[in-house]
DNA sequence: CAAAAGTGCTTAAACGCATTAGCATGATTA
DNA sequence: TAATCATGCTAATGCGTTTAAGCACTTTTG
């Protein structure tokens, strides 16, 4: 176990001061008018002995950690996992690393995690805010900490955010079902007042109004265990007999499909908010409102990097269009044969 | 933006020394014989003003960061994402946080990431090693840094690892297909000499021998773009006409299913190594070798925590059983009707 | 030709905390 | 009564960096 080399070792060995070595290492040789000869000598020696600065000491001194905190609802959800992946790649290429945690959308956990990151002095935050975190977010903004929210925002707070056009996406999905001739179009969503859910609900309602249909809304409690949830869903299907269902998230869709499969019920038409790699492999293939994952990740990391560079004083609020990907599950034919 | 409170502020305000406050904060009040009265007074004041120590300074001084580095092949792969999720939860409850990065199984990236974590002084490592990282891992072990490998190991290195029984899992899957009467059972795997792939190949081969069948092996290059890969796969299907396919990973299975779907070919029987939430929703439902995700995560984090506590001097190598989950995709009936 | 500016470095003070060694007091012991 | 000990705390140092300020020259400038 060879002992760690310090900057002072370099300085001593070369007969110069620590400061000089530090300047050279941080690319300030020219600025600080250090001779080319010495610069080269130091650089060569550093490479030769394989010296690497202690990042902790560096961070303590500079206040920068080159770490971005990613506070995300659930890293095992493909939508979030894919975005995380893209963010990670982009951040990496800019010299930033990602520290992440999943919140399960629980307020206490979210708050705790944000404070944790703050203790660690992360340079910036990318957050999917749960409910009840208004004060925490306000405090970050008050302290001028670089921050971007995504997937949802907090009404009344002037923060950067990147979301998809939930209202239009939900409207399009519902309108599509209506145009295909479905009359009893249900929405399956969460008990949640978060903006993305609220907007999807509004989009659904607007389409229902446009086509003068009756709304059928089933709200699901994510805390329920799977059995309860499935029974609950079966009851809803039995009572309301929808001929089409719009699921407000991908995991609701997956749960719903599972429940439908179990009971071998007449298969309604189905649309899911959020696409999934496997939806195109289902029988029938599943129609989905696909969010522009690359664009979201790009906007997120660019907005954050801008802030980190000191640019971007203005807050930036980005709403990206979602695209309705029409597949078999919402076509009248399939539905007819399935019935 | 209120100024950050320091430990020295607490000390000054209370008229005691920084040392005393530090002792109390670190639970050494009793050990250092500090009076109960003062202890309480300090604790109360700390709570009142909401003081939080600077974790960076703490880490610099103690050499501990309370961070675990998770170097994983691909966080957007559900198998890894789910394990990451479980590890995160367990680590969190023990006061550790997770810093993660995806390697894409590229050696240079893996090495770079490990060194990065080392620079950041993470306390421990959980790694899915790519090929060509032997020296890096040896160096970690040589420096007595707590470390657990998973999903695969590095032959000849005495490191902790947690893997599933790939050989038996692959054998069972193949044997299952053979017992169902399939004669032309193909293996689709990667160009890779990593242990998990090697063992799955060996398991397949052993079953092929047992049932005296002919092997049909298709190796896939993950660097190929999707179109090339699909064409390649179609060619293999055309030439070899397998009646059953065992995919060595979940993403190979997904790619394969996609390719099969595109061409509307006669559907072979299918088994995938690694299960997937959605496999039970497919038509037909997909038979899979399911790895014990919870057990893997538990073993991983426990082994690491033990090392971090200074216990567990002995290296620990855990092989957990995989379970064959039989569904429709490998039943002879379905296959017959699909043909 | 004196003052200003440039040159190529170094000194020393942070950054915020943990920790070792030690010091002053009063109580106990011999 | 002096030596010893327990008590309850503090001074001082170290962790590995960055960086503002400075130093002793030489060169340029007005």
Image (spheres, coloured by chain):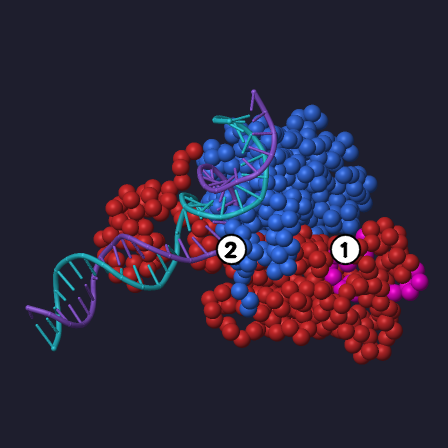
Chain colours: A blue, B red, C cyan, D purple
Question: Which residue occupies the foreground of this view, A246 or B60?
Answer: B60
Instruction: Please give the name of the residue rendered at 46% of the width and 66% of the height, measured from the top-left corner.
Output: B309
Quickly name the residue at label 1.
B254
Left or right of A266 in this view: A157:
left
Q: What chain letter is assigned to the residue under label 2?
A: A
Please, what secondary structure does the residue beneath circle 1 have? helix
State the quadrant of the N terminus of chain A.
Answer: bottom right
Residue A182 position by quadrant? top right
Dots 1, 2 in contact, CB < 8 A: no
Question: Was residue B250 drawn as part of the magenta stretch in this picture?
Answer: yes
Residue B107 in the image, given as x and y percentages of width and height = 71, 60
Quickly name the residue at label 2.
A8
Above or below for B101 versus A286: below
State the quadrant of the C terminus of chain A.
Answer: top right
Q: What chain letter is assigned to the residue under label 1?
A: B
Magenta range is B238-258
Left or right of B233 in this view: A231:
left
């Amino acid at each position: 176990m060879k002992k760690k080399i310090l900057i002072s070792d370099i300085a001593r060995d070369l007969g110069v001061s620590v400061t000089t070595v530090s300047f050279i290492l941080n690319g300030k040789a020219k600025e600080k008018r250090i001779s080319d000869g010495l610069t080269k000598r130091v650089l060569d020696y550093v490479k030769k002995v394989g010296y690497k600065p202690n990042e902790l000491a560096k961070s303590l001194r500079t206040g920068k950690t080159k770490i971005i905190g990613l506070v995300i609802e659930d890293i095992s959800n493909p939508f979030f996992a894919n975005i995380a992946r893209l963010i990670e790649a982009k951040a990496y290429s800019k010299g930033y690393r990602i520290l992440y945690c999943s919140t399960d959308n629980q307020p206490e956990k979210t708050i705790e995690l944000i404070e944790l990151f703050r203790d660690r002095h992360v340079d910036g935050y990318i957050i999917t805010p749960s409910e009840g975190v208004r004060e925490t977010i306000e405090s970050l903004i008050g302290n001028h900490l670089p921050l971007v929210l995504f997937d949802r925002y907090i009404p009344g707070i002037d923060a950067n955010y990147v979301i998809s056009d939930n209202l239009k996406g939900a409207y399009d999905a519902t309108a599509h079902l209506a145009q295909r001739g479905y009359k009893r179009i249900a929405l399956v969503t969460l008990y949640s007042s978060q903006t993305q859910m609220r907007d999807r609900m509004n989009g659904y309602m607007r389409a229902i109004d446009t086509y003068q249909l009756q709304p059928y809304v089933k709200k699901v409690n994510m805390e329920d265990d799977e059995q309860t949830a499935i029974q609950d869903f079966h009851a809803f299907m039995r009572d309301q007999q929808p001929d089409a269902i719009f699921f407000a998230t991908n995991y609701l869709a997956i749960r719903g499909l599972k429940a439908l499969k179990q009971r071998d019920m007449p298969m309604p038409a189905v649309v899911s908010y959020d696409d999934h790699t496997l939806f195109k492999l289902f029988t029938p293939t599943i129609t989905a409102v696909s969010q522009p994952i690359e664009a979201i990740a790009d906007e997120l990391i660019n907005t954050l990097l801008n802030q980190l560079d000191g640019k971007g004083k203005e807050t930036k609020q980005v709403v990206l269009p979602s695209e309705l990907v029409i597949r078999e599950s919402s076509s009248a034919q399939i539905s007819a044969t399935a019935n």
